[in-house]
Image (cartoon, helix red, strand yellow):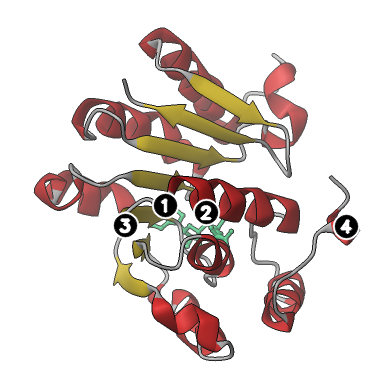
Amino acid sequence: MEENYVLRPHPLFYEMEEYAKENSIPIVSSATGKVLSHLLGLLKPKTIWELGTGIGYSTLWMAYGSPHSEITTIDRNGSQASLLEGYREKWDVLQKTDIRRITSWCMDYMYENIDLWSDVDLFFVDCDKVTYPQIWELLSLKAKPGAKIIYDNVLWHGRILNPELQKPSDVAIKSFWEKVKDSHFPFTLYPVGDGLLFIEKP
Ligand SMILES: C[S@@+](CC[C@H](N)C(=O)[O-])C[C@H]1O[C@@H](n2cnc3c(N)ncnc32)[C@H](O)[C@@H]1O
């Protein structure tokens, strides 16, 4: 999908894209944001946990798609993630959603607080790619049956297709894919942005 054809529901999304570009902060593509928002609008999960807030761009797409969900979003960079609050205030539609922000390393927080998230309906994972396999092992084991798990960047700019590319992030994304396939959990790859993978725990 051409990013130019993605209808942003409010100018603040353009503002966030501009800020991310100027400050070299990676965010999901607008098309990925739109697909996320659409999927969540259909699923209407009661609870969502996001791993990797950034400046809250994906968080606000999710809030727009499913305003009555309770969203918890985790990022180790608290000052950057706090920008989310300012952006959210720019559009009253986003006030409906209960958004809780946590400053922590994802793996530490997830391991130490399994009881807080084991009943969560939907996870969106977009933190350091090196952590993807470990996060998958934990979520696939401890999330409840029926939980939806969505990962961004699963195509890793096409690097996963080249066996010679062996950076830690390349190895991690390839290992993540192997683990997902070995699990036999049903999944759908949305070839949007850098690849959005939707998995459902049976
Ligand atoms: C790709 S950005 C998230 C972008 C955001 N999901 C969006 O599309 O608007 C990745 C974020 O994850 C955070 N991060 C990376 N590894 C992390 C970890 N192990 N624990 C916590 N946060 C992490 C970084 O600080 C960064 O803000």
Q: Nearer the viewer, residue 181 or 174?
A: 181
Q: Is residue 112 something one can see in this rendering?
A: yes
* Tag 3 residue: 105
The three-letter code of the residue at mark 2 reads Gly
Q: Mark 2 and mark 1: span between their CA atoms? A: 5 Å
| Ligand 1 contact, mark 3 (Cβ < 8 Å) | yes
The three-letter code of the residue at mark 4 reads Tyr
SS label for mark 4:
helix
Q: Mark 3 and mark 4: span between their CA atoms? A: 35 Å
Sequence-first disc among 1 and 4: 4
* Tag 2 residue: 41
Sequence-first disc among 3 and 4: 4
Q: Position of residue 37 (x, y in %)?
A: 58, 55
Q: Mark 4 and mark 2: span between their CA atoms? A: 20 Å
- Which residue appears at 73% of the width and 40% of the height? 192
Q: Nearer the viewer, residue 21 or 30?
A: 30
SS label for mark 1:
loop
The tally of labels here is 4
Sequence-first disc among 4 and 2: 4
Q: Mark 3 and mark 1: span between their CA atoms? A: 27 Å
Q: Outermost residue, left direction?
A: 115
